[in-house]
Amino acid sequence: RLVVARQQASEAQLTMLHIRVEEARALLSADANGLSDPYCKFNMKGTKYKTKTKPKTLHPEWNKTFDIPCAEKDLPTSIEFIVMDEDVVGKNDFLGAHIFKLHGLKDKPISGWFPLRNKDGVEDMPRGQIRVRMFYNGKAESLPEIKSSKNKSMQVFRTMTLAELDAHEDKNLDVFVGTWNVGNAPPPADLSPWIPKNKYTVYVIGAQECKYKFREQYQSCEEDWEATLYTHLGPEYALLKSKSLGQMRLVVFARKKESSKFMNFETATEATGIGHVMSNKGGVAISFSYNDTSICFINAHLAAHQHKVARRNSDVNEIMNGISRTLGKLKVDVMCEFDHVIFMGDLNYRLDYGNQGEEKTPSLEQFKQMVQKIEQKKYDQLFSCDQLQLEKKKGRVFCGFKEGLYNFAPTFKVLRQKELAYNHERSPSWCDRVLWHSLTKDWIEQVELGGAFDIASSDHKPVYTVLRLPTYHLPSLVDETVLSIRLSLDQVKCFRLPPMDQNGLADPFLQLIGTWFPQSSKNQSTVVKKTLNPVFHGIPDIKSGISNPLRLMYNNLVIKVCDKDVMSSSTIGYTILPLRWFLPENGKAQRTKMFRHHLMKGGVYVGSAVIQGQVTITIERGE
């Protein structure tokens, strides 16, 4: 290329074309493992250019810069960037392409995310997006100036990165979340008392016991239910994803004009019924990304009856552990995987009012007292007896989750009539719930919470909430002024780990997990044998694959504590460290900070186990 540059140096008005192919997201899966091995290529005046192949990912980070000498008269009118899946044997698979028009590039650089299309240039299906930056950097008439223009291009790319960051203001996403035990009866024709029309960008609806005689134009109850919701919301909305497990259903609708912002859909189910196989109880999950914010919704139906509190807690733990094996990039605990987790459903927690104890049916006197408090709207007095709140305070379930104030009448067990009345066979209870957990700097805000008491076809009243989710756009991978970013862990120890082996001890070690550095079996400590209070050594430093501290502000380090067995290992628990807590501030090169956390797994504290240590992040900058 230098030879070509020398040949062209004598030409007046010589221009350098600078292209950076940064990354892609939400690519198509081309391989049997559900992933791809993507690379990006383009041709310019007979010369082929190509990034490296990134194995086993739908979100490749190529970060490849091309500096191409090009006389202005030879500048093409367009360049097509093609993303391919590389196969070891056979023909490489086409994933998508984007054609960039270059006629205005001299005056305005190209920078941002761009949709991938099919070979005909049509957006026939969601193929993902590619992040590209491209510009001309002036005129040059000699080779030394061409070389210097390459150095100047780094400054221009930096300016483009900052400009894009300023242009994308992080916004909130208002989501309508509804949950209803349908009671195995056809829903009413008018769902307006529960679901307002054309008001929110996203509607996520969870249903339980949703099996009834479907209308003759449909092939299943699932299809009938989805059609009922679609008809109610109207043609401005699209069904983005649905998933069922037995009689549990979860659907996601969004405004059609906003639907391109939703990507990376995945689904999972976990049965907790008889033998932990039957699907009469359990959970169904849908996860996706809104721009760069990862979100997971879980709809569950837990074990019924007054005395099954411990079983309900166990169901929640089993559901969260089960879907963690399926959803997300890292396949770690769901609370460490997603920016936001929303858990809804008929959770079946009851009121421990008076001396009912474990009896299914309250005494007539107890029932009358509860109904009287409901009529007097003394909800706080009843809610103080709520099993879920009591269990949550004890750290037995939904640790780290938040929930709103149920300042309305209990939604179970009601008579199937318009006037609110309760069945004396069960204690009135708030069985139908919505909880949430966030990893972002700002947590989810609950805007509204209520029940739809005019709907009378079930022994449950529908519940709804409006949640305001903080969302974000990820900055560029690269800060041209940064040479490297390194994270070190020191003085890491655990206390009071649970026994994992027959000798009453464990053989613990640490695994370090994250999306911002290459995953490797080397990212772990040495094993500390026969102890419940290990001090860990041999923890490798982590060199970030991202050089932009602003990007790392949105990333986390997951620490997984494992027990080493002869042939394998088992998970003891997790903690998560948001990097924004540890990154140096105000231009400083280094920052050291301690941490101390309870170990968690499946929304539950791992006994009284604690992990603590010291994190140091060092940023090396160029001149």
Image (tube, grey):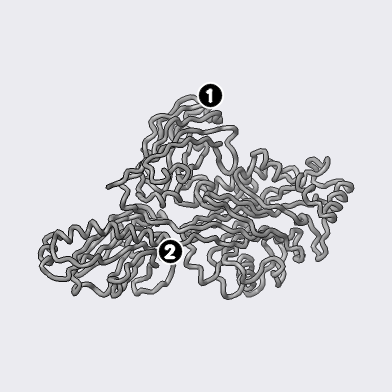
Local packing at callout 2 (Cα closer than 10 Å; few below 14, some 14-19, many 20+) is few
Residue 328 located left or right of residue 434 = left
Q: Which amino acid does label 2 sit on?
A: Ala
Q: Which amino acid does label 1 sit on?
A: Asn
The residue furthest right is 365
Report x, y in % for residue 323. 54, 50
Residue sitting at x 52%, y 26%: 505
Residue 436 located left or right of residue 66 = right
Q: In the rendered image, which residue does mark 1 sit on?
A: 503
Report x, y in % for residue 341. 56, 52
Give the position of the N terminus as an image quadrant.
Answer: bottom left
Q: Nearer the viewer, residue 24 or 588?
A: 588
SS for dot 1: loop
Q: How many marks?
A: 2
Judge whether residue 91 can be spotted in this image: no
Report x, y in % for residue 429. 76, 51
Q: Which of 365 and 202 is in front in this view?
A: 202
**Up/down of 614 relative to 65, above or below:** above
* N-term-proximal mark, 1 vs 2: 2
Tag in front: 1 or 2? 2
**Up/down of 561 relative to 348, above or below:** above
- CA gap between label 1 and label 2 equals 59 Å
Q: In the rendered image, which residue does mark 2 sit on?
A: 167
